[in-house]
Amino acid sequence: QVQLVESGGGSVQAGGSLRLSCAASGSSFSNFCMGWFRQAPGKEREGVARIGRFDSIAYADSVKGRFTISKDNAKNTLYLQMNNLKPEDTAMYYCAARFGYCVASLSPDEFNYWGQGTQVTVSS
Protein backbone atom coordinates (compact mmCIF):
# COMPACT_ATOMS: atom_id res chain seq x y z
CA GLN A 1 0.00 0.00 0.00
CA VAL A 2 1.14 3.56 -0.63
CA GLN A 3 -0.02 6.94 0.62
CA LEU A 4 0.14 9.94 -1.71
CA VAL A 5 0.13 13.65 -0.88
CA GLU A 6 0.09 16.31 -3.60
CA SER A 7 1.28 19.89 -3.32
CA GLY A 8 2.18 22.81 -5.54
CA GLY A 9 -1.18 23.81 -6.94
CA GLY A 10 -2.27 27.42 -7.15
CA SER A 11 -3.61 30.21 -9.34
CA VAL A 12 -1.69 31.51 -12.34
CA GLN A 13 -2.38 33.51 -15.46
CA ALA A 14 -2.42 31.90 -18.86
CA GLY A 15 1.09 31.28 -20.10
CA GLY A 16 2.41 30.77 -16.59
CA SER A 17 3.99 27.73 -14.99
CA LEU A 18 3.46 25.54 -11.95
CA ARG A 19 5.26 22.52 -10.57
CA LEU A 20 3.23 19.89 -8.78
CA SER A 21 4.78 17.42 -6.37
CA CYS A 22 3.49 14.13 -5.00
CA ALA A 23 5.16 12.64 -1.95
CA ALA A 24 4.71 8.90 -1.52
CA SER A 25 5.05 6.89 1.66
CA GLY A 26 4.30 3.42 2.92
CA SER A 27 5.92 1.43 0.19
CA SER A 28 8.89 1.48 -2.14
CA PHE A 29 8.19 4.12 -4.75
CA SER A 30 10.11 2.30 -7.44
CA ASN A 31 7.63 -0.60 -7.46
CA PHE A 32 4.84 1.54 -8.88
CA CYS A 33 3.70 3.04 -12.10
CA MET A 34 2.89 6.66 -11.22
CA GLY A 35 0.50 9.04 -12.89
CA TRP A 36 -1.07 12.47 -12.84
CA PHE A 37 -4.77 12.92 -13.50
CA ARG A 38 -7.11 15.88 -13.43
CA GLN A 39 -10.79 16.55 -13.04
CA ALA A 40 -12.57 19.76 -13.93
CA PRO A 41 -16.02 20.57 -12.52
CA GLY A 42 -18.70 18.63 -14.35
CA LYS A 43 -16.18 16.52 -16.25
CA GLU A 44 -14.79 13.03 -15.85
CA ARG A 45 -11.35 12.45 -14.42
CA GLU A 46 -8.78 12.21 -17.21
CA GLY A 47 -5.20 11.05 -17.49
CA VAL A 48 -2.53 13.69 -17.91
CA ALA A 49 0.74 11.75 -17.80
CA ARG A 50 2.28 8.63 -16.39
CA ILE A 51 5.78 7.32 -15.77
CA GLY A 52 6.71 3.68 -15.41
CA ARG A 53 9.08 1.83 -13.13
CA PHE A 54 11.82 2.14 -15.73
CA ASP A 55 10.88 5.66 -16.79
CA SER A 56 8.63 4.90 -19.74
CA ILE A 57 6.50 8.02 -20.17
CA ALA A 58 3.18 8.80 -21.80
CA TYR A 59 1.25 12.06 -22.06
CA ALA A 60 -2.26 13.04 -22.99
CA ASP A 61 -2.30 14.79 -26.35
CA SER A 62 -3.66 17.94 -24.74
CA VAL A 63 -0.52 18.47 -22.63
CA LYS A 64 2.25 17.19 -24.91
CA GLY A 65 5.04 19.72 -25.28
CA ARG A 66 3.83 21.72 -22.27
CA PHE A 67 3.90 19.31 -19.31
CA THR A 68 6.77 17.14 -18.10
CA ILE A 69 6.43 14.26 -15.68
CA SER A 70 9.43 13.10 -13.67
CA LYS A 71 10.24 11.30 -10.45
CA ASP A 72 12.95 11.00 -7.85
CA ASN A 73 12.99 7.46 -6.50
CA ALA A 74 15.40 8.39 -3.73
CA LYS A 75 12.96 11.02 -2.44
CA ASN A 76 9.83 8.97 -3.23
CA THR A 77 8.49 12.00 -5.04
CA LEU A 78 6.68 12.46 -8.34
CA TYR A 79 6.62 15.78 -10.19
CA LEU A 80 4.61 17.46 -12.91
CA GLN A 81 6.15 20.56 -14.46
CA MET A 82 3.42 22.51 -16.22
CA ASN A 83 4.42 25.28 -18.63
CA ASN A 84 2.41 27.53 -20.92
CA LEU A 85 -0.70 26.87 -18.87
CA LYS A 86 -4.08 27.48 -20.46
CA PRO A 87 -7.48 28.19 -18.88
CA GLU A 88 -8.61 24.74 -19.99
CA ASP A 89 -5.95 23.23 -17.71
CA THR A 90 -7.97 24.42 -14.72
CA ALA A 91 -8.84 21.36 -12.62
CA MET A 92 -8.13 19.41 -9.49
CA TYR A 93 -4.95 17.47 -10.11
CA TYR A 94 -4.44 14.05 -8.56
CA CYS A 95 -1.43 11.86 -8.14
CA ALA A 96 -2.05 8.11 -8.51
CA ALA A 97 -0.13 4.86 -8.27
CA ARG A 98 -0.49 1.44 -9.78
CA PHE A 99 1.53 -1.45 -8.39
CA GLY A 100 3.84 -2.96 -10.97
CA TYR A 101 4.12 -2.04 -14.62
CA CYS A 102 2.23 0.67 -16.43
CA VAL A 103 -0.33 -0.25 -19.04
CA ALA A 104 -0.71 1.64 -22.29
CA SER A 105 -3.92 3.32 -21.22
CA LEU A 106 -4.04 6.52 -19.17
CA SER A 107 -7.37 5.44 -17.76
CA PRO A 108 -7.95 6.25 -14.07
CA ASP A 109 -9.43 2.75 -13.73
CA GLU A 110 -5.93 1.28 -14.04
CA PHE A 111 -4.67 2.99 -10.86
CA ASN A 112 -5.30 1.79 -7.34
CA TYR A 113 -4.01 4.50 -5.01
CA TRP A 114 -4.90 8.17 -5.06
CA GLY A 115 -3.92 11.39 -3.34
CA GLN A 116 -6.38 14.01 -2.13
CA GLY A 117 -5.71 16.39 -5.00
CA THR A 118 -4.34 19.90 -5.47
CA GLN A 119 -6.22 22.67 -7.26
CA VAL A 120 -4.81 24.39 -10.33
CA THR A 121 -6.60 27.49 -11.61
CA VAL A 122 -5.51 29.27 -14.78
CA SER A 123 -7.03 32.63 -15.59
CA SER A 124 -7.12 34.23 -19.03
Image (cartoon, rainbow, N blue to C red):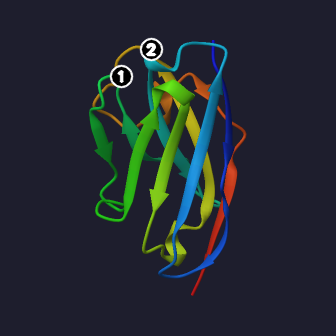
User: Which quadrant of the view contains residue 112?
Assistant: top right
Count of picture labels: 2
Asked if the residue at tag 1 contacts the one at tag 2, i.e. Cβ–Cβ closer than 8 Å, the answer is: yes
The residue drawn where x is 48% and y is 21% is 98
Q: Name the outermost residue toward the front.
A: 74
The residue drawn where x is 54% and y is 77% is 87
The residue drawn where x is 63% and y is 12% is 1
Secondary element type, mark 1: loop
Local crowd size for mark 1, using a 10 Å CA cut-off: few (<14), some (14–19), many (≥20): some
Work out whether 84 lies above or below 44: below
Quick check: 107 left or right of 12?
left
> Picture coordinates of residue 18 (x, y %)?
55, 64
What amino acid does circle 2 point to? Asn
The residue that disc 1 covers is: 53
> Picture coordinates of residue 6 (x, y %)?
66, 43
Secondary element type, mark 2: helix
Q: Please tell me which residue lies in front, 107 or 114.
A: 114
What amino acid does circle 1 point to? Arg
> Picture coordinates of residue 69 (x, y %)?
40, 46
The residue drawn where x is 50% and y is 45% is 79
Quick check: 110 left or right of 117?
left
Sequence-first disc among 2 and 1: 2
Local crowd size for mark 2, using a 10 Å CA cut-off: few (<14), some (14–19), many (≥20): some
User: Which quadrant of the view contains residue 70?
Assistant: top left
Q: Name the outermost residue toward the bottom.
A: 124
> Picture coordinates of residue 92 (x, y %)?
65, 55
The residue that disc 2 covers is: 31
Work out whether 109 lies above or below 22: above
